[in-house]
Each structure stands twice: as structure tokens, then as C-alpha cells.
Image (tube, grey):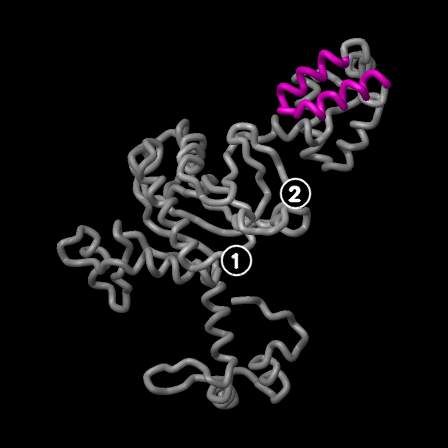
Amino acid sequence: MLSYAGGSRRRKNNGIVIGFRNAKRTDWSVERLLEKVKRTINGSYHAKNCSDLEFDLAITIYELGGDAALHALHNSPFGFPCRNTLAERRSEHKLRISVGTVRMEDLLYNIEVMFKNLESRGEVGMTLCLDEVACDGRLCWIPATYDIAGLCEHASNLSSYKFGKSLDTEILTAAFARNNSRDYGAKLVLLLPTCKQGTLEDAALILEKLRQAWRMSPYGEAMHGRIWSLASDGDPKRRPALYQHCMVREIQPADSIYQHAGFLIGMNLWTGSNFETQDLDWKHCLKRLCKLLCTWEGILVNGTYVNKTLLATWLEHSTDVDWSEEPLYHLLNPLSTGAQEVAA
């Protein structure tokens, strides 16, 4: 431990040289490099050229002990690398972030990165998954494409680029997953900062670009198989977009899939142009049904309006469960209990 501590203490004699190496590796701007050089000269910044052992130890401590443990060791005499320094080594794949709009070159590049070295044992069905995830509301510079990522896709039409006005805290993600027992994890191919204010046409266009990119890429459909289903949550703009993509043609007896699904009673035989089906999150489907059932208008089923009044009548006659007046009221009026409404 003493030998490690002696070898890992911050050194000032070659700080400027190491600073130039760090600048090249992390794509520092000229202004930031000059600032680091000045801080190195006055002793407020100590550049360090960490070894692979030190990086591995720091990554292990960060993954086991979290940010607090790594921060403490970073400011200790051991001088472990900080979290930002480890970010490059911890990322297994370097994907492109789309800026402003979904660009085909970004999709093709990300598909190649994620699927080029993936072992393929014959074609399997693929699932295209889309959803939004939370992110930090900050900007980042992408040297490969000379773009500033983090702005909303509509930022080009905004009057101001000040912080807080056009920064997003959500990212639209799209991933392809293999329907196979091997390598079935979803693999990202799209990262797009979003304000979720797009239209139905925007959502449909994104889906079409993803489908076309998978078909065009030599590491996509030709290597791993065509898309079977388009999966998403209950986003109100993406649902009708999925309908447009997956209700194009009806399966006919001449189609090979007809012998498997054509005789299933109640089966929706309408699919996309290449037999894609839509797969929405069932929880969101149940939420929408429950929300409609709890309204006075209800749902029209075979000429009968099924609403909360009819449900209350049915439940009152149930002999298996003792529905007293108060539990029954709270069941049919969930918002009255103080619970937050979940957007369907």
C-alpha cells in the first residue's frame, strides 16, 4: 500500500506534459487547456497520468462504494481519478447523440457500433423499443460531429439558448432487442434530447427512420433479421404513430404467417408493410381502460354503456367480496383518496 501511495501521489514536475495528454484524450478546448496550464503553474491543479491499475481500482471503488467513496479518495493523498475521468473508460460503447433531429448517419453509425461484433447465428426476429429516460439538464460538446448536444429538438426555432429555456431533462431512446436466447438485451441506437412536444407526424417519422436504418445497415436486418414488433409505452403521440405503421396490410392466406395466426379467433390480422406488429405496454392499456370505466360516459360495448354506475350495481350483487359503500366509492373514484393520477 505504501509503494502504491508513493507511486500515485500527484506530481508537479511533469504536470504540464500530462495536461497536454489529457487535453488530447478528453478533447479540451484551447481556453480550458490554457486554464489548466496556469493552474498547474500556480499549484492549484495537479495533472496525473494514472496507470491501468489505478484506473481499474478507481472503477471498482466507484461501482462498489459509489460517488462518495471515489470523491473521498480523489481528494486524499492517493489521488484517485475523479468520476469524469473514469467516464470514458467505463463506457463500453461510444454512441452518437442526435442533435435537433434524428439523422440517418447517426442511426447507421450506432447500429454498426452495437451490432457489428455481435455474433450472429442465423436471422432472428427483432423488437424495436422506444421510451424516454431522465437525464441531466446540461450541454455537452461532440467533437466527432461538431455539435452541442442537450438542446431540445426544436431548439433551432427558439428565441433564446439560455440555460433553463431549451435544455431537456429527458432523452428519447430507441433500441433493438433480439428475440433469441443469446444476446437478447436491448441495444441502444438512438439518443435524442426531447421536450416531448412533438406531433404525431414527428413520432411517425422517427419510427420510419429507425425501420429504414435497420433495413439499410449491413449489420442490421441482413445480419440479424427483420423487425417483428414495435414496442413502446403509452405515449399519446406515439400510439397513433404505431397505428399508422402497424395497421397497413391484412394477413392473407397466401402469406406464410397465415397458417399460424390466420385461424385464431379474435386475432388482429393487420400488420405493418413487412408484417410488423405493435406492442404497447399493457399497464398503460389497463390505465386507459380503468380511466374510461371510472367516467360517467364509460365504454360502449354491444350497445351498452359500461360506466361506474353499472359497475357499482354489478359489484353490489357480488357475493364473494363484501363491498360496503365506502370501499366501493373509493374504488370507482380513485382520485378522491388523495392518490396522484397517473397519466394514461
Q: Position of residue 228 (x, y in %)?
A: 32, 49
Q: Which residue is mark 1?
A: 197
Tag 2: amino acid:
Arg
* Residue furthest to the front: 159
Magenta stretch prevailing secondary structure = helix
Query: Which residue is pictured at 77% across the width and 37% down the height?
Result: 68
What residue is drawn where x is 50% and y is 46%?
A: 173
Task: Report x, y in % for residue 119.
Answer: 38, 29
* Quadrant the N terminus occupies: top right
SS under mark 1? loop
335 over 171 or under it: above or below: below
- Magenta stretch holds residue 30: yes
Residue name at image x 68 percent, y 75 percent: 338
Residue 26 falls inside the magenta stretch:
yes
Mark linked to residue 138: 2
Q: Could you say which disc has been placed on residue 171 in the image?
A: none
- In the rendered structure, the answer to whether residue 214 lies left or right of residue 89 reads left
Residue 15: name its quadrant: top right
- What is the secondary structure assignment of the residue under circle 2? loop
Residue 76 seen in the figure: yes
